[in-house]
Amino acid sequence: MDPTARSLPLEDVHRLLTGMYDDYLRGDSTAIDDRLAEDVTIFDSAADALVTGLEELAALRRARASAPAAPPPWAWTENSLTVEDLRVREVGDILIATWWLRVDGTDSHGAAISPELSRNTAVLQRRQDGALRIAHLHEDVRQEARPVV
């Protein structure tokens, strides 16, 4: 394979998404933001309002961190996020990606839980330097994580 050849859009998008989810597990919001367009729009799975831009995303993160949330019915820890069934198509100068995100975790005793599954859509743009940035992200949780019974 020619090392100077440009990789396929599917490979580029997979690398961006898996990197973003690794950033999330590390709690590195700055690295996540580097993968997003400054004017990104996001339908976050845990918020009703459309998030527009990195400043609103930062405000959403602050609100989550400071909100006195009701205790969850059971506690769990996210251990891995896996991109499954990724599909990418090019439409002009943008890429449209769809995938399922599987979130595996453990309960407060370290036992595996039934995974959370969400379907996702992203619109990505390639910058002049070749780097991809997410311009729009839509998350839709279809199966919430739950204890295995």
Image (cartoon, grey):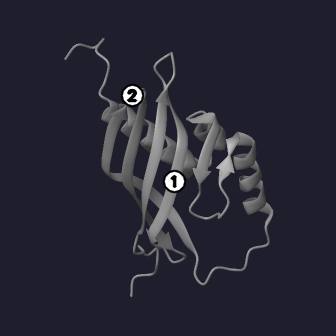
Horizontally, residue 143 falls left or right of residue 68, namely left
**Residue bearing the label numbered 1:** 138
Give the SS element for disc 1.
Answer: strand
Give how far across and how far down residue 45 sits, in percent: 56, 62
Image quadrant holding the C terminus, namely bottom left
Residue in front for this viewpoint, 94 or 139: 94
- At label 2, the amino acid type is Gly
Of badges 2 and 1, the one in the foreground is 2
Q: Quadrant of residue 37?
A: top right
Farthest residue, direction front: 92
Q: Earlier in the sequence, mark 2 or mark 1?
A: 2
- At label 1, the amino acid type is His
**Residue bearing the label numbered 2:** 92
The residue drawn where x is 37% and y is 39% is 14
Image quadrant holding the N terminus, namely top left
Q: Quadrant of residue 95?
A: top left
Farthest residue, direction left: 1
- The Cα–Cα distance between marks 2 and 1, rounded to whole angstroms, is 20 Å
Label 2: few (<14), some (14–19) or many (≥20) C-alpha neighbours in 10 Å: few
In the image, which disc is placed on residue 38?
none
Give how far across and how far down residue 78 sits, in percent: 51, 62
| Looking at the image, residue 118 lies above or below residue 5 | below
